[in-house]
Structures are given as C-alpha cells and as structure tokens.
Image: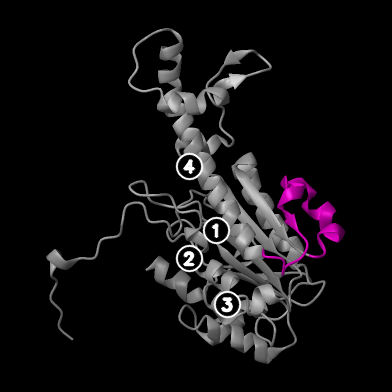
Amino acid sequence: MKTQFEPKTVIKLPKNSNAFAIDTPDHLPALHQLLIANGKRGSGKTLAITNLMRMYREHFKDDLRIIIVSPTFGSNYKMLQDLGIKKEDVFDDPDDGIPEKLMKIANDERDDLIEYENLCKYYDEFIKHLKGSSYHSMEHLDEYMLQYYNPETNQFERPKPKYKRYLQGKPCVLFTFVDDAQGSFLLSTNKKMLQLALRHRHLGQFPAPRGGAVGMSLFVATQTFKSNGGLNKAIRNNCTSLIQFKSKDMSELKQIAEAFSGEIETDTFIRLYEEATKEDFSFLFVDLHYKKGIQPSGFRKRFDNYLIEEEEKEKSSE
C-alpha cells in the first residue's frame, strides 16, 4: 500500500500530559498505576504489593501517602507498618463510602498545595508591611497573618511545606491499596468506585490555567479476575499492570490473556506465565506501559527478573 506523509497534520502530545506524569526510578513502573494482583488465598498478593510500595517509598520517602482499604489490615499490620501509613488513612469497611473518601483526600491534597503556594506568595509582602514598607493590599495579609505566626518561637515565619515536593510545585504521591475486598460492593457494582477507577489519575484537578491533577494510583488484590461479585469489567479493562500468581484454573488464565489481547497474544502470555510461576510464591508481572528504551521488557518474573522473548533478542541484535 502506498502512503504519503503530510507533515502539517501530525498529532502533537501536550507537554504536561498527566498519564504518567510522576518521575520514577528507571527500575520501577511508571505512575499513575491501576494495578491488579490476582491469586488464590495465601499466594502472596499482599506481600508482592507491599514490597512494590516499599520500593516506591524508598524513593519518595515522606512524599508518598498510602491509603489502605482492607477489613484485615490488623492481621497484616507487621507487613505494612514500615510504609509510614497513618491511622486516619486506614479504612476497614470497603463499603463505607470509600470512593467519596478517596476523592476528598485527593481534593484536600490539591487544596493544601494551593494554600501553601499562596502563603509563600504573600509572605514577603507581609514582612514588608510589618517593616512599614509600602504594599498594594491588605486583603490577603489579613487572611494569612495568623498562619505565619509561630507561638513556640513568638515569630512570624515563612510557611513550611507539608511535603518536600511542594518546593518543586508538585503535590504528594497518592497510593490506595484495596486488599481482601473480594465480593464487596466497592469492587463489583459501586458506580462511584468505577468512575474513580476510570479517572484515578485525574483526581484532585488543579484549576486553570495551571492544569494537571494530584492523581492517585490504585493497587487491588483479588482472588479471581473474573467472577460474579468480583472485579468489575471497567476496573479490569483499565488496569495498567497485572501481578498473576500460579493458578490451576486454565480457563481463567485464558480469560486474563484475552483481556490483554490488544497488547500481547494469548499463547505468548501463557508461555510467559508458565516461566514466571515455576517456583512457589513467584508471579508474572505485566507492565502495559513499561519504559521502552530503559526497561528491556514489559514482563517480569516477580519484579527482579525481566522476561525477554528470544524473538525480541534477535530483533534487537540485528
């Protein structure tokens, strides 16, 4: 087929696209994520996800805020205690208005950053006013005056950022881990949760002309990928990555492979899965948006071994 290039009609991507807007280390998946971990009870789903979150925390440190939605958080507390999770960020009832709470958290984080930036913007003007210098308006100074005052030092001080990322004009990094919520209203038919899953990276939108959003990565552990009362299709179809543990249900594996048919052939998926799950507690990690040119493959055995098809090796060597 003959083609002819028209340079005037090339599609251009926006400079500040929010799809994977957060800078991450080369060895970790891009953010924001909607990750599904699928495996039978006791397979290691919680261990895998908490380790992945630990790796992100080692990079982002206190700039990472993790929310837990799990009725069994108490039994897994030792596994999660090193992730800096606060009590107010743990919700033990998956059907207690979780989507609304998550949206509020994202909006509050957005508002907190905007408030901090406004405080910094007017601080110098406030100090000039205290020294008797000229100023344009007292409207904002009156509003922020008490927030500049530190009663411990009896001094007016420049506001301190809640997160170090504020100094770069960036919000915190938000994760939500939904664990042991299989069969809940939250993951099956809750329309607000489905809407949240569809637009998770757009949560906490900043007003124009700034644009962008805080966004939130979702990590969901499930015992069955497809079943009555299981994961809703909207969540499955919008996942960016998958952790698949060993399963005896070949029909389900084929269903999972078919769900990724636009990205990978079924036979290839099964072959990679069999290689990755040869060992106990091992799993196949599929990253649909792996960093091409940096990461050699979108498939891994656990997180520490890239799986590279021989055909890909041959092509890269030509």
> Label 1: which residue?
29
x 65%, y 85%: residue: 226
Horizontal and vertical percent position of residue 254: 61, 88
Q: Amino acid at mark 2?
A: His
Q: Amino acid at mark 4?
A: Lys
Q: Earlier in the sequence, mark 3 or mark 1?
A: 1
Q: Amino acid at mark 3?
A: Arg
Q: Earlier in the sequence, mark 2 or mark 4?
A: 4
Magenta range is 71-97
- Classify 10 Å Cα crowding around label 2: few (below 14), some (14-19), many (20 and above): some
Q: Nearer the viewer, residue 203 or 129?
A: 129
Q: Earlier in the sequence, mark 4 or mark 1?
A: 1
> Label 2: which residue?
289
Which residue is at the far bottom?
A: 251
Relative placement, left or right, of 300 versus 18 is right
Element under disc 4: loop
Element under disc 2: loop
Q: Is residue 76 magenta?
A: yes
**Mark 2–mark 4 distance (CA, rounded to whole Å):** 23 Å
| Residue 269, disc | none
**Mark 2–mark 1 distance (CA, rounded to whole Å):** 8 Å
Do the residues bearing badges 2 and 1 touch, measured as CB atoms within 8 Å?
A: yes
**Mark 2–mark 3 distance (CA, rounded to whole Å):** 15 Å
Q: Quadrant of the C terminus?
A: bottom left
Relative placement, left or right, of 104 versus 138 is right
x 53%, y 70%: residue: 195
Element under disc 1: loop
x 66%, y 68%: residue: 220
> Label 4: which residue?
170
> Label 3: which residue?
236
Element under disc 3: helix
